[in-house]
Amino acid sequence: MKKRIAAVLLASVMCGLSVPASVQAGGDGEDYQYREDNDLIDDDLEGEDLDTDYETDPDPDVMEANTLIPEDLRVSPAKKTIYKGEIFDIQIVAAGGSEFDDLSEEEWYDIRERSIDSITFRSTKSNVASVSRTGRVRARRRGSAVIKTTINLSSGDSVTFKTKVYVKK
């Protein structure tokens, strides 16, 4: 979520720093001064920076329509058989039939970043199958384990999914 906000702010600042060619050529008779970091300095403000940092509040109706709820989510795979030493990643995907099912990877990533506060993974038997903070599962020894994936949404809701892992020799 922080990365998305930073990208939006950076884009806003970059757009704000765009100066029309007529101004660059001095077409309006004004002299503009810029600091080394490209912030505009206004002579009338005695060298103080002009406030170019602002954030536009998104339309709440658009945000609500593009916010995930627990029913929109699932994990993949739901079960997996692997051999000792093998690894695989648990993925958070759109539930089949949800409005998010046909999105491009980029659109899905954006909605996930905006809607998901945190994801935690936990193995019921880490000596059989361990799991990293990012959902990478490693088969340790023969047996079975359940990887629990808990997703905390920005709406305050949370949902837990289970991935059954069978490890063979």
Image: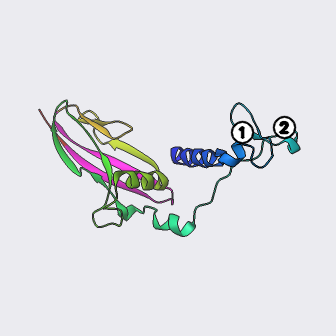
- Crowding near pointer 2: few (<14 within 10 Å), some, many (20+)? few
- Name the foreground residue: 146 vs 138: 138
**Label annotation for residue 39:** 1
Residue extending farthest to the bottom is 61
Q: Magenta-highlighted stretch: main secondary structure?
A: strand
Quarter of the image for residue 100 reads bottom left
Q: Position of residue 46 (x, y in %)?
A: 88, 39
User: Per the image, is 143 magenta?
Assistant: yes
- Crowding near pointer 1: few (<14 within 10 Å), some, many (20+)? some
- Name the foreground residue: 12 vs 161: 12
Query: How far is the residue under mark 1 from the one under mark 2?
Result: 11 Å
**Label annotation for residue 11:** none
Which residue lies at the image location 82% right of the left edge and 40% below the top edge?
48
Q: Which residues are magenta?
A: 142-165
Is 100 displayed left or right of 138 in the figure?
A: right
Residue extending farthest to the left is 169
Q: Position of residue 148 (x, y in %)?
A: 33, 48
**Label annotation for residue 47:** 2
User: Per the image, is 97 magenta?
Assistant: no
Q: Are marks 1 and 2 in contact (CB under 8 Å)?
A: no
Q: Position of residue 2 (x, y in %)?
A: 54, 45
Which amino acid does the dot numbered 2 rest on? Gly
Is 3 displayed left or right of 150 in the figure?
A: right
